[in-house]
Each structure stands twice: as structure tokens, then as C-alpha cells.
Image (spheres, helix red, strand yellow):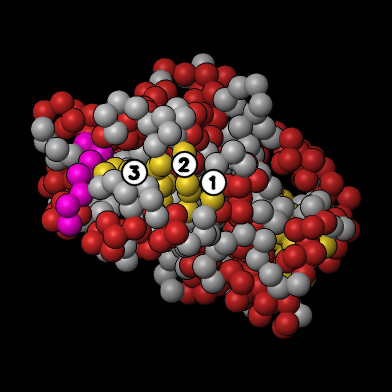
């Protein structure tokens, strides 16, 4: 099938390449010439495992191309809109400028029978607002949210755990759903749940899923706060409650909390939308979820300060990690970098290392010192704090080896990812999050 993908960020670039990898003819369109040039050379503009390979293959096969010309969408019959919906500069609501601009720019190139599939995470009700403009061209607007996780984006796109398509009742909607079944044929053929629903439900599925995940993380972080004043261990608590299949252990990782380009902004936009709908109190708990999450960053900073006898001034602190999570170079709302910046603000000499995110981090926070080599970063440190649980630090860093490099023996485990017993055995004073 001939597809266009409007917006070539994390979502769109992966979607375009993944759709080409399953046999479609795809054009990716973005206003950013530099991004388009990089993608056209078959290179990934950001770190995402597996993306480089499918991009290069797609370009070489001739089935995948990238352009800044919206007119290229004219050849396609299905158009995915995957532009960003960032938090507004002066509030919590989502900024829909890019969605509106992209859809308006696409309108002149739509033909009757085309399908426009919104993938961006939007406030519920957005599709209803866009629909009259799109449907005046004879095209059908559906909402087809994306659930990809950074670091697993290629896999999540080619082999998702579910597909959701929001359509209007009637023939056009049914036909559009069938077209999307064809687009996603390998996943549909293997029995992936394909949920056809109305557009508001589809829009809500995405924000509800992210709100639930954020709530789950903040729940366990709230338990960590209780554990801290009772001597309990939140990791053992999570293991124990996680065995209940109704609860499950995933996303019960207590630590410095969630960040990234999705969860923080999505829960805020959801709360803002609920207020607009007169149902603010229904999701009032999301403010608490947000507040708990942000408190964990304070807690990590406090632990380092306490461990260094109340003063980090002129102390050398090595920060392991900058990305908001492992397997990503994304530093948007990264709790890891936030902790590093706060320690720097308290007068510490902060050295940050990360396997993938240093370039992005340096652009955003040039005041910090960045060192690519992990061992060089550790050399001479008074204290070490793990803030992104890359395997390079969590599994592969031997505490005995680390002590041969550092000056102090203080380790703060901001992700509860280290083997506490092994670090203690090697002579370190270990501090976890919500652990005695
Ligand atoms: C998230 C959703 O998972 C995905 O479905 C949606 O499409 C986009 O938003 P992503 O932002 O890639 O994906 O990251 P995710 O893996 O969900 O992690 C989010 C944050 O939560 C990270 O900062 C991570 O470190 C943190 N986290 C995750 C925890 O603090 N504890 C956990 O147990 C799990």
C-alpha cells in the first residue's frame, strides 16, 4: 500500500521505517530539512535499537523515502499523522499547533477514499474538531494511537500488543478500519487484538494507558516514602505484591521516577482536558501522581547530600546516566539530568556519563562536565549516583573495580538497580530509594 507519514520524530520516523519493512511504499514528511536529510541517507536522527537497520533497508529497497514536500502525500492513500503534541509553554494543556498545521497542510493533497489516521497523543475530542476539514475532501479520519516505548519502538510498531482504531459508525468508518487491518497485516495475521471503537475512546485509550502507568510508578514511589520512615524495603514489597497477577511486578520499579517525552506531559494534558470538560476532579489524583514523582528527585539529591555529611560543595560526584531511561538518548524531562543539574547547583563538581545521551545532554545543560568513558568518569569521585539503569552500570560495573577508581565509597542507587549486597561487600556505603 502507499502510505504517507507526516512528522518524522520518534514516532513518525519509526512508523515510516517499520511500515516500509513490512512491505509498504512509504513517504515520510517533515518540515525539518536536517532531519529529512539524515533520514534520506538511511541514518537514524536519534538512538533507537533496530531503527538504523530498517531505515537503511527501506531506502535501499526504494520503498522508503523522506521529503519536506507535503505534495508527496498526494500519491498515498493512507496518511499517518504523527507530529508532536508538547506541553503548552504557559500551561499544562497539550499544544495542538503541530497537529492542526500538519492536517491543514495535508488537506489539498487528499483524495476521496483516502484514510487519515491520527497517531499523535491528543486530548479527547481532537478528532471531532479535525474531522469536518478532513472529511470535506472525501477522506475519512480515524484515530489510531501509538503505544510504542522508546528503546523498543521498532518492535512495538511491527509487533504491538494491541492495535486500536477509532472510527465513526457507518460504512466509511468500517471501510477505513478494514484498510488499517490491511496496513497492519502481519500483526493482524498473527492474532494481535485489533480493537475497532469510536474516535473519543481511541483518543482516551492512549492517555488512560499512560495515566495508569504513571500512577503505578507513583504508587510504588509513595510506598518507598513510607518504607523510608519505617525501615521497610520497597523492592521486596514490590516483589511480594507483584506476585499477585492482578497487580503484576512491571512498572513497580521505585526510584527517581518517570520522565521522558510522554508520561509527564500526557498526565498533565489529561488533567487539563478533564478540567475543560468539567470533570477535573475525576483525575485530580494525577496531580498527586505528578507531585510524588517530582519529590523522588528531591529525595535522591537529599540522599547524596546526607551521605556526604550535609555538604556537596566542592565534592566530586559522578552521575551514571543522563537519558530518561536506558536504551534511549532522549533527555526530555529526564529525572537523571534533573538530579545532576540540582547537584551542580549545590556547588558539587558533577561529571555525567551515559552510553548514548551525552550529546543531547550537553546541548541542554552545557554547565555540567560530560565524560564518555565510564571509568574515566568515575576516577576521583567522592560519591557515585546511578540515575539511569543502563546495563553498563547496573550489571557490568564491578564494585571492586569501581573502588579502584573513586576517592570515596558512597553509592546512591537512584533506580534500585544495583546489587546492594555486592556493593556493600566491596566496602561501599550503599543508599537505595525506599530501602534501609
Ligand atoms: C511511555 C509508555 O510506556 C508508552 O506506552 C507510550 O507510548 C509512551 O510513553 P516511554 O516514554 O518510552 O513510553 O517510557 P517508559 O518505558 O514507559 O518509561 C517512562 C519512565 O518511567 C522512564 O523515566 C522510566 O525510567 C520510568 N519508570 C518505568 C520507572 O520509574 N519505574 C518503572 O517501574 C518503570
Residue 382: which disc? 3
Q: Report the side of 426 relative to 130 (left or right).
A: left
Proximity of marks 2 and 1: CB atoms separated by less than 8 Å = yes
- Which part of the image, by quadrant, shows the N terminus? bottom right
Q: Quadrant of residue 43?
A: bottom right
Residue 350: which disc? 2
Q: Could you tell me how far apart the alpha carbons at marks 1 and 3 are, in whole angstroms?
A: 15 Å
Residue that sits furthest to the bottom in the current view? 61
Residue at image x 18%, y 30%? Answer: 228
Question: Which of the two residues, 193 or 64, is positioned nearer the viewer here?
Answer: 64
Q: Quadrant of residue 258?
A: top left
Which contiguous range is marked in magenta? 426-434
* Mark 1 vs 3, N-terminal side: 1
Residue for badge 1: 369
Question: Which of the two residues, 79 or 199, is positioned nearer the viewer here?
Answer: 79
Residue at image x 59%, y 69%? Answer: 51
Amino acid at each position: 500500500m502507499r502510505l504517507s507519514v507526516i512528522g518524522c520524530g520518534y514516532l513518525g520516523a519509526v512508523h515510516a521505517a517499520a511500515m516500509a519493512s513490512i512491505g509498504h511504499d512509504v513517504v515520510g514528511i517533515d518540515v525539518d530539512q536536517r532531519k529529512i536529510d539524515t533520514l534520506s541517507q538511511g541514518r537514524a536522527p536519534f538512538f533507537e535499537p533496530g531503527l538504523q537497520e530498517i531505515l537503511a533497508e527501506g531506502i535501499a529497497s526504494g520503498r522508503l523515502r523522506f521529503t519536506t514536500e507535503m505534495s508527496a502525500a498526494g500519491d498515498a492513500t493512507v496518511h499517518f499523522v504523527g507530529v508532536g503534541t508538547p506541553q503548552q509553554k504557559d500551561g499544562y494543556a497539550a499544544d495542538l499547533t503541530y497537529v492542526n498545521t500538519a492536517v491543514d497542510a495535508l488537506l489539498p493533497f487528499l483524495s476521496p477514499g483516502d484514510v487519515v489516521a491520527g497517531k499523535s497523543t491528543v486530548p479527547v475530542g481532537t478528532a471531532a474538531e479535525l474531522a469536518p476539514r478532513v472529511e470535506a475532501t472525501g477522506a475519512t479520519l480515524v484515530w489510531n494511537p501509538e503505544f510504542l516505548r522508546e528503546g523498543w519502538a521498532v518492535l512495538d510498531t511491527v509487533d504491538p500488543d494491541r492495535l486500536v482504531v477509532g472510527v465513526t459508525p457507518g460504512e466509511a468508518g468500517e471501510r477505513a478500519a478494514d484498510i488499517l487491518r490491511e496496513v497492519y497485516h502481519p500483526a493482524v495475521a498473527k492474532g494481535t487484538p485489533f480493537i475497532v471503537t469510536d474516535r473519543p475512546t481511541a483518543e482516551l485509550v492512549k492517555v488512560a494507558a499512560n495515566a495508569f502507568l504513571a500512577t503505578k510508578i507513583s504508587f510504588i514511589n509513595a510506598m518507598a516514602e513510607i518504607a523510608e520512615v519505617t525501615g521497610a524495603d520497597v523492592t521486596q514489597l514490590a516483589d511480594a505484591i507483584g506476585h499477585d497477577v492482578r497487580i503484576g511486578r512491571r512498572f513497580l520499579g521505585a526510584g527517581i521516577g518517570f520522565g521522558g517525552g510522554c508520561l509527564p506531559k500526557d498526565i498533565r494534558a489529561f488533567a487539563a482536558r478533564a478540567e475543560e470538560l468539567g470533570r477535573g476532579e475525576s483525575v485530580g489524583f494525577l496531580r498527586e501522581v505528578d507531585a510524588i514523582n517530582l519529590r523522588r528527585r528531591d529525595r535522591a539529591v537529599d540522599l547524596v547530600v546526607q551521605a556526604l555529611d550535609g555538604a556537596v560543595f566542592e565534592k566530586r560526584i559522578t552521575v551514571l546516566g543522563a537519558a530518561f531511561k536506558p536504551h534511549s538518548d532522549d533527555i526530555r524531562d529526564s529525572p537523571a539530568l534533573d538530579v545532576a543539574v540540582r547537584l551542580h547547583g549545590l556547588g558539587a563538581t558533577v561529571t555525567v556519563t551515559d552510553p548514548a545521551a551525552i550529546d543531547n545532554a550537553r546541548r541542554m545543560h552545557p554547565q555540567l562536565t560530560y565524560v564518555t568513558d565510564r571509568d574515566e568518569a568515575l576516577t576521583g569521585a567522592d560519591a557515585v549516583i546511578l540515575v539511569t539503569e543502563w546495563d553498563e552500570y547496573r550489571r557490568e560495573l564491578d564494585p571492586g573495580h569501581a573502588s579502584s577508581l573513586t576517592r570515596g565509597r558512597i553509592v546512591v542507587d537512584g533506580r534500585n538497580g544495583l546489587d546492594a549486597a555486592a556493593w556493600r561487600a566491596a566496602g561501599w556505603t550503599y543508599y537505595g530509594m525506599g530501602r534501609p
